[in-house]
Image (cartoon, helix red, strand yellow):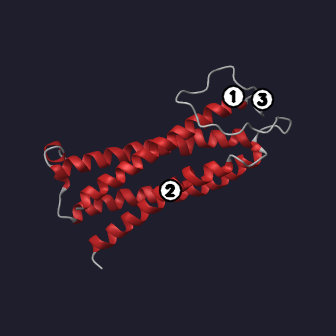
Amino acid sequence: MSLYLFTVYLHIFAAFIWLGGMLFLAFVLAPVSRNIEPLSLRGSLLKTIGTRFRLVGWICIIVLLITGLLNIFNRGMSHEIFFPSQLFGTEFGKTLAIKLTLVFLMIILSIVHDFFVGPRMTALMQNLKEQNPPSPPFKPPPLSPPSEGGEKGEVKGGMGLEELQKLRWQVSWLARLNTIFAILLIYFAAKLAR
């Protein structure tokens, strides 16, 4: 097996795991977990799975970045492909620029989700005091964040259900945007491979 074929295989395999895992979390785990009560159990489950997938996902991202660069050079291109005249002056360069922009945006969204909003939401779910009523049934998040003065409930640290609803809204939109970017990324990756 040639080095080029090996790096292409690793690139596709890492993309499959990262994007497939994100889609599984968004379309399977998140909807099913909405029915798990008490809320603290749901928080523990999401934290455990999220922590495990975060490790796998970030390993895949590193593999994708390394193999992506190797694939460009293994196709006979030099570092000059990243010069503006090459990047925006050829069809391949323009497609590559779009793909790299999508990758950059997905990494930024993943950082926000994996290290800020997601852990904050699961910690809030885990710390829910037992005297709080079960969480309301899930409703698809609105296009705008929940307004102030919503449902009140206290958890350890003084945060309430209102804060949890805002975090759910943020996590939901981060996942939606990343899913859209993932679909576009697959399209532009296929376009580059032809």
Residue bearing mark 1: 162
- Checking the image for residue 83, the label placed there is none
Tag 1 and tag 2, C-beta contact below 8 Å? no
Q: Who's the residue at 27% across and 70% down the image?
A: 4
Mark 1 residue element:
helix
Q: Is residue 135 left or right of residue 80?
A: right
Q: Position of residue 159 (x, y in %)?
A: 72, 29
Tag 3 and tag 1, C-beta contact below 8 Å? yes
Image quarter of residue 49 = bottom right
Relative to 184, is 75 above or below? below
Q: Position of residue 181 (x, y in %)?
A: 40, 46
Tag 2 and tag 3, C-beta contact below 8 Å? no
Labels 1, 2: front one = 1
Q: Position of residue 104 (x, y in %)?
A: 37, 45
Front residue of 157/133: it is: 133
Q: Who's the residue at 39% across and 50% down the image?
A: 183
Report how far apart the C-alphas of labels 3 and 1 lie in the structure.
Answer: 7 Å
Relative to 192, is 43 above or below? above
